[in-house]
């Protein structure tokens, strides 16, 4: 009886040792590509890039996030290469998945993906994706004063034109 008990303990010990290996053997898959944007604007040194793989809901919007990855740009400028790993066991071949991303700095979203970027299932790509982000609508306007002289010039010309018109009418 003690032999069976020792054999069982040994078997459980071996299973516990190889369990992490079995999890790794299950594997991961990845999406690879580059991120850029069209605007000729340098990113602040503290900018963070966030990428997500999300399920697409029945209404066509991005839903449950499958995986998310964030990395600091550390002053680097686009294009940025990415390798977003995910667990293929959580992917349902009958569903649609999208890649979405953001570039943020100081609590503000500077750039974001526009619309759905289908990935993984169906004929959607998994590698060499080219993600072009657009200016986010929620960004703050440039600091006042950077173009304030144009506003004063327009007001001044408008007033001058009004004065000239009044003088001509008299």
Image (cartoon, grey):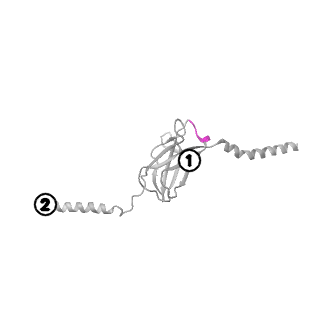
Residue in the image at 67% along x and 44% along y:
24
Q: Residue at x 56, y 47 (%)?
A: 83
Q: Residue 152, percent across and down?
A: 28, 63
Q: Is residue 20 magenta?
A: no
Query: Where is residue 148 drawn, in percent x and y?
Result: 33, 62
Q: Which residues are magenta?
A: 88-93
Where disc 1 sits, the SS reads: strand
The mark tally for this picture is 2
Earlier in the chain: of badge 2 and badge 1, it is 1
Left or right: 115 with respect to 66?
left
Could you say which quadrant of the image residue 5 lies in?
Answer: top right
User: Is 108 on the left or on the right of 9, as rendered?
Assistant: left
Pointer 2: what residue?
Answer: 168
Residue linked to disc 1? 83
* Residue 49 rendering spot, x and y as whole percentages: 51, 53
Name above or below for residue 4 compared with residue 144: above
């Amino acid at each position: 009886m003690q032999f069976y008990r020792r054999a069982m303990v040994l078997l459980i010990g071996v299973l516990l040792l190889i369990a992490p290996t079995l999890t790794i053997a299950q594997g991961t898959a990845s999406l690879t590509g580059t991120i850029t944007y069209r605007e000729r604007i340098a990113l602040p040194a503290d900018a963070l890039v966030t990428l997500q793989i999300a399920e697409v809901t029945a209404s066509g919007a991005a839903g449950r996030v499958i995986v998310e990855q964030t990395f600091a740009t550390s002053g680097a400028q686009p294009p940025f290469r990415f390798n977003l790993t995910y667990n293929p066991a959580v992917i349902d071949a009958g569903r649609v998945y999208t890649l979405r991303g953001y570039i943020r700095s100081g609590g503000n979203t500077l750039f974001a993906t526009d619309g759905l970027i289908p990935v993984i299932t169906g004929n959607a790509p998994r590698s060499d994706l080219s993600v072009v982000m657009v200016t986010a609508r929620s960004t703050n306007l440039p600091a006042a004063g950077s173009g304030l002289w144009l506003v004063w010039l327009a007001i001044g010309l408008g007033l001058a034109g009004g004065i000239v018109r009044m003088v001509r009418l008299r």
